[in-house]
Amino acid sequence: MSRIESTFARLRAAGQCALVPYIVVGQPDLPTTVEIAAALIDAGASMLELGVPFSDPLADGPVIQRATYQALLNGTTPRDALTVAQRIRARYPATPIVFMGYYNPIMRFGVAAYAQACAAAGVDGLIVPDLPHEEAGELLAACRNAGLDLIPLIAPTSDDERIAAMARDAGGFIYGVSVVGITGARRDLSGDASALVQRIRAYSNLPIAIGFGVSQAAHVRQIAQIADGAVVGSALVDAIEHAPAGDAPAVAGAFARSLLAG
């Protein structure tokens, strides 16, 4: 049983929703990224989604774009992200780690080599938002050979035929996109999320995590009623961006605890 599978199984048995924080590798710097990850896990995060910086993060809103830009200015590379994952894995052997990154750097690295390097670093799965399902065959095969899960993003605009095809090839969990648009904190959770979860469940028994727009404890509680996990990105990345120098890990940990409160 993979780390992702065992984590969701444990949480389901306890009647709990997974908290999946997203952070950008290299924001504000590589050593602090490791400490932020540690603070999030210590605060109760169920798994981590690590953003691998890329120059054209087309699925992301301005907060994550700024963090990505800062990370790139710091010189952060995919190999740095692997090193960060390796350091987190050494400290937290059981916590699932998922890379969220775009396809161009994966192609440049080499698809099979990237999957093998991720597995060797302790990464459990990949999310690649700009890779259409119809073109994912090479990466899907590489992930399966390396023992990684390829986690699809399914949006409210996906028709049933497309949901069925993506669910058939999915591994780990399915990432349900709560809104039509880019990442970014929103005041209210989209009403489309519940309907999307129901449509996905018609084609898959995998856990479903909802992301895009999730920013507060009330959203996490809402998601816990309909899905298996809540992904929180922009609001956390924004808190890290505005944390006083040296305080980013503490700020991130406090933010995670606030999401789990109540």
Image (cartoon, rainbow, N blue to C red):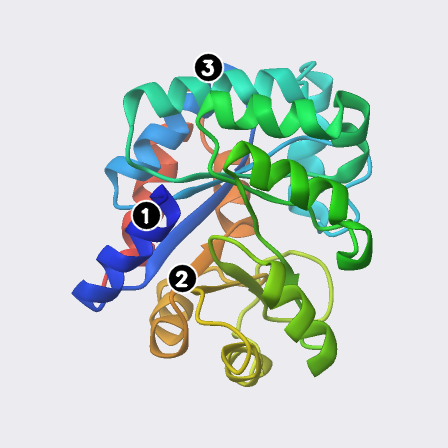
Q: Which residue is mark 3?
A: 31
Which residue is at the far left?
14
Q: Which mark is residue 46?
A: 1
Corner quadrant of residue 254? top left
Q: Which residue is mark 2?
A: 229
33 and 147: which is toward the camera:
147
The answer to whether the residues at label 2 and label 3 have Cβ atoms under 8 Å apart is: no
Give residue 63's position: percent from left, percent from top.
65, 45
Corner quadrant of residue 40? top left
Give residue 229's position: percent from left, percent from top.
40, 62
Q: Amino acid at mark 1?
A: Ser
| Point 68% across, 33% down: residue | 68
Local SS, label 3: helix
Q: Is residue 29 visible?
A: no
User: What is the C-alpha distance between the residues marked 2 and 3?
Assistant: 27 Å
Image vertical order of residue 261 relative to residue 116, above or below: below
